[in-house]
Amino acid sequence: NAGVMQNPRHLVRRRGQEARLRCSPMKGHSHVYWYRQLPEEGLKFMVYLQKENIIDESGMPKERFSAEFPKEGPSILRIQQVVRGDSAAYFCASSSPTSRETQYFGPGTRLLVL
Amino acid sequence: DAKTTQPTSMDCAEGRAANLPCNHSTISGNEYVYWYRQIHSQGPQYIIHGLKNNETNEMASLIITEDRKSSTLILPHATLRDTAVYYCIVRVSGSARQLTFGSGTQLTVLP
């Protein structure tokens, strides 16, 4: 049973470009969470999604950031017009409907904005 | 979710047991104690969780006091690869909400 998969593992963007981060949850998991870890800081929740629905986006910056989890395919975290302050590690986690409390994390995507 | 308090850092000799404490004095009856760890630059890794009974799995043991106000994560034979930040998180049973990571304990396993 493959774990949570994220790609790309490393992403370099110039200021003003768009970044798209992908997350494939574990098989059978329908809950996806995105977290961000800024350099030398702790993990901060961004958004919680179920298939085709955003459940909680209280941690998402108000502008430039969006997330989706379509019926088919991976969850996408999209950052438009990236700025240097967006440089961070972005982690995705998933949980199953029957054991929602336990989240399993992917390896993360390291975004570097030049 | 109840607040937790952990020491900032701990050292442990390789091969010895690592005992990581966590205080959660405001825990309520339907809240579980979860432990995760984050090895440098990797994604957080689930370790173990429990409600009130002691739990053991292939990674660790979790000892929860009878009054549930504190717990200890035990790595029975620490290796260098166990060097990581360990997070104690309390959350409600059945909760699908986000995890709130505090500062955790930086465990350094020394050769």
Image (cartoon, rainbow, N blue to C red):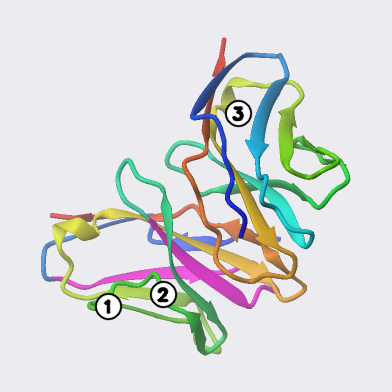
Position of residue A71 in the picture relative to residue A66 (left or right): right
Q: Main secondary structure of the magenta part?
A: strand
Q: Chain of mark 1?
A: A
Q: At x 52% / y 90%, what residue is drawn?
A: A52
Disc 1 element: loop
Q: Which residue is mark 2?
A: A58
Image position, residue A91 (x, y; %):
45, 58
Q: Is residue A20 above or below residue A38?
A: below
Question: Which residue position is annotated with label 3?
Answer: B82
Region of the chain picked out in magenta, as a range: A17-36
Determine whether the residue tagged by mark 3 lies in a helix, strand or loop. Answer: helix
| Residue of label 1 | A62
Type of the residue with mark 3: Asp
Callout 3 crowding tier (Cα within 10 Å): few <14, some 14–19, many ≥20: some
Same chain assignment for discs 2 and 3: no
Total labels: the figure holds: 3
Amino acid type at image mark 1: Lys
| Residue at the (73%, 70%) spot, across then down | B94
